[in-house]
Image (spheres, grey):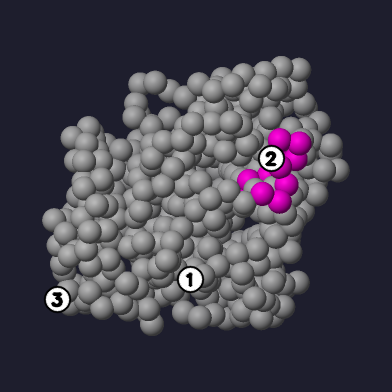
Amino acid sequence: MRVMSTVTLTLFCAIICCSLTEKRSNVSSPNIIIMLMDDMGWGDLGVFGQPSKETPNLDAMAAQGMLLPNFYTANPLCSPSRAALLTGRLPVRNGFYTTNAHARNAYTPQEIVGGISKDEILIPQMLKKKGYVSKIVGKWHLGHRPQYLPLEKGFDEWFGAPDCHFGPYNSSIRPNIPVYNNSEMLGRYYEEFKIDRTSGESNLTQMYLLEGLDFILRQTEDQRPFFLYWAADATHAPVYASKRFLGKSQRARYGDAVMELDYSVGQILSLLRSLGIENNTFVFFTSDNGAALVSGPKESGSNGPFLCGKQTTFEGGMREPAIAWWPGHIKGGTVNFQLANVMDLFTTSLAVAGISPPDDRALDGLDLTPVLLNCPHTLQNRQVHYTHTHTLEKQKGGINFCPGQEVQGVTTHDQKEHTLQPIIFHLGRDPGEKFPISVLTKEYQDVLSRISPVVEQHKKTLVPGVPQLNMCDLAVMNWAPAGCEKLGKCLKVPKSEPWKCDWPH
């Protein structure tokens, strides 16, 4: 196991002048937009040092808002991190994990039987208390069976897909992924919704942009507070971009996708200004996990100075780009080094809306509004992650998720146990995690003595949720989604033969 140095995070603001409810007594509930990118790395933004400087809109967003360099995900893989964002709870609490064998990273492929538990409460469900209208645009990835889809979990509208845009598939063996408009499919990826695997051309990001803009415009005209969860996925392999952006980046096709997403962010913020609602709209930009180094140089991003990437719990897999933007509330041009986590977006969104978080469950997300609004505050130590290193088991032919970045004794190819003697790094002087602190030093012993009680207390109080990612079945794949009859797109469902999912990585 490994430990990160303990740092502090604001828990609450004590003085009434910073109370959000006081500040907005005569203003309608603020709109909330969360922009979640897919496999975009910390080092992909110009503001974080990307030398190509191809993200002018995101860099401007940071200049007008707050940059959070120490922002983390809850899991280095799509589905668990998204479940954590929307519930404010660790994947082990909300059920987005597996107990099968030695699996570390489980997600929701087409054959997954489970999905987001009916017992979990998501952001849009809470926001309904204040009359918010909620829409998800893009990738859901929290279960594709009918009972798990977004409109069953508090969202009022949806345009996007339940799974990754992998494919194309032979429909007799595996169906292509459906694209939904609300509760019914409009077609499938690689069929009605084209993705050219050779050229990388696709208009999906433009579709997602227009859906987002239309939603903002409609809710503004109706004078209703809104929550937009904009989850575009162009930077997930196979990466894609529209013709206007293809070939424009210095960073190959991946860079083209980033440029189009950056343009889209700029268009959304521009619309907020033109409608005069920028001072009443809280916007947060981040990614679900680090860049996927295994996708190769032309289809993966940069994790900057950090070790490894997606599917590892090293810094490259867990630390994400993050920008908070709220003119008139968040001071422009600020950089805040407070430790923060994607689960904080649950509690923070509720605080912005003036809603108390649910008190019937353990929440791992904290309210970041005191940090964002620069209120006077008290500080409390917060441990972000204490995790298993991602070793590779030779006998299983494991995948190397750290190509070209191997560190002896750290990114090993043999299964090793680090529970009793965790690998500890000092990220301030070694952000790349190349030099573990020697177990023989006083520094190591001092950190261990402070961390161990926190870990033990967490273990004692943890109540795991029912694992949702254990069982697979070919019969539950996207053979006949709702609306397929109208389109003549229903496929024959095979016999149900469930098995325990195998997660070899």
Q: Say what secondary structure mark 3 lies in.
A: helix
Which residue, given by chain and number where applicable, does mark 3 sit on? 395
Q: Is residue 461 visible?
A: yes
Magenta region: 323-334
Q: Residue furthest front?
A: 442
Identify which residue, 28 or 341, lies in the foreground: 341
Q: Amino acid at mark 2?
A: Ile
Q: Say what secondary structure mark 2 lies in.
A: loop
Which residue, given by chain and number where applicable, does mark 2 sit on? 330
> Contact, CB < 8 Å: mark 2 with mark 3?
no
- Residue positioned 75% across, 40% down in the render: 327
Q: Which mark is residue 305?
A: 1
Earlier sequence position, callout 2 versus callout 3: 2
Quarter of the picture containing the N terminus is bottom left
Earlier sequence position, callout 3 versus callout 1: 1
Earlier sequence position, callout 1 versus callout 2: 1
Classify 91 as above or below 303. above
Question: Of circles 3 and 1, which is in front?
Answer: 1
> Contact, CB < 8 Å: mark 1 with mark 2?
no
- Residue positioned 57% across, 38% down in the render: 371
- Mark 1 Cα within 10 Å, few/some/many (few <14, many 20+)? some
Indicate left or right for 475 with 137 as reference: left
- Residue positioned 46% across, 79% down in the render: 296
Whether 119 is among the magenta residues is no
Q: Amino acid at mark 3?
A: Gln
Residue 50 placement: quadrant = bottom right
Image coordinates for residue 273, horizontal then vertical, percent: 82, 43
Question: Of circles 2 and 3, which is in front?
Answer: 2
Q: CA distance from mark 3 to mark 1?
A: 31 Å
